[in-house]
Image (cartoon, rainbow, N blue to C red):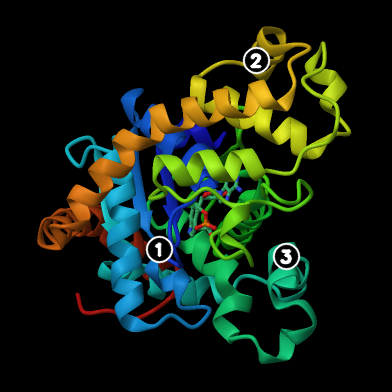
Amino acid sequence: MTQLVHTPRVFSGIKPSGGLTLGNYLGAIKRFVETQETGVETLYCVVDMHAITVWQDPAELRTATHEVAAGYLAAGIDPAKSILFNQSQVSAHAELGWIFNCVARVGWMNRMTQFKEKAGKNAEKQSLGLYAYPSLMAADILLYHATHVPVGEDQKQHVELTRDIANKFNHDFKAPDFFPVPEPVIEGPATRVMNLRDGTKKMSKSGESDMERINMLDDAATIAKKFKKARTDPDGIPETYDDLSDRPEARNLVDIYASLADKTPQDVVAEYAGAGWGKFKPALADVAVEKLAPISDEMKRYMDDPAEIDRILAVGGDKARAIADPILAKTYDLVGFVRPK
Ligand code: TYM
């Protein structure tokens, strides 16, 4: 239904809350570039308003915003093909976010597993923004009438909530199909890259130890060391990929290899069947360095020229506003807000 009335449009975002990880690259940016190359309309955002749901030092927030933008650009997001901007430049995100705070139900928010994980036993001490965050994420997506949202596995529940918000808004304001009901796009071998020290936890920007993640700005020696020390089990690479189903650390390394090398995990297992970690880990480090070193060099080049990044983000912000403003205006009309004629 939705796809019939809404032209396909892709939106996704990354929080500038610390450095980019291999999880962000394989689960998000690499796939964003592939999507851009299909010719569909794409918007990619540095979601700085989401970052401040937990405390960010202002100077570090600016640096992290530049780093995420540099990561997008270095990996192949082309500002001539995709709209690349940071969220706070388009005030309509906050405005639509407020309306969605009034559409979403407290019970819906209470089900969000990411809030529960992040807040832990300290829910009372978290910012109200962290709790309401998924409704701002819905605004990010629906402000552009986006139909497809490429994300890693951990964001699936938030995109499903976005679908609920779209449906409830359309229903409550008697505007069938006004907001599209967007599809999460979660594909490929690396939709959940795991922590290198604990294969039951996802690799994240803010883990306890730097050894548990690969950062996009890590140098070749650090990448090799982290993979060498990555936790595994005594068995090496099995005969089939299915044999890895209850070996999370081993499966993670195979999945990372597959994603970096643009192979299927089944092919990687077939290629290395019977090999020990002493053979597989250096091969993994080699493919990682081969793919990541040019990106990290290019990231550093961009980060040495923050004025150029700011210029690109400002142009993207103008293009984003051109799409967002009429959609927000129509939303205000539907809600019944009086506006200057
Ligand atoms: P964030 O900043 O935590 O992560 C950005 C993207 O990277 C993916 N990702 C991973 N994928 C695979 N394995 C991992 N270990 C891994 N870690 C992160 C995430 O799934 C995500 O796609 N709430 C979002 C940002 C956001 C957004 C949006 C996304 C805000 N508004 C609108 C899409 C559409 C977040 O915190 O992602």
Crowdedness of circle 3 by 10 Å Cα count: few (<14), some, many (20+)?
Answer: some
Of tags 2 and 3, the one toward the viewer is 2
In the image, what residue type sits under mark 1? Val
Q: Which residue is mark 1?
A: 47
Q: CA distance from mark 1 to mark 3?
A: 19 Å
Give the number of the disc on residue 172. Answer: none
Numbered disc in front, either 1 or 2 = 2
Horizontal and vertical percent for residue 196?
A: 67, 47
* 301 displayed left or right of 117: left
Residue at 78% x, 18% y: name it.
241
Looking at numbered disc 2 in the image, what kind of residue is underneath it?
Val
In terms of secondary structure, where does tag 3 sit?
Answer: loop
- Residue at 48% from the left image edge and 26% from the top image edge: 286
- In the displayed structure image, the side of residue 299 where residue 55 appears, left or right: right
What amino acid is labelled 3 in the image? Answer: Met
Q: According to the image, label 2 marks what residue?
A: 268
In the rendered image of this protein, does residue 176 appear above or below residue 95? above
User: Which residue is identified by label 3?
Assistant: 112
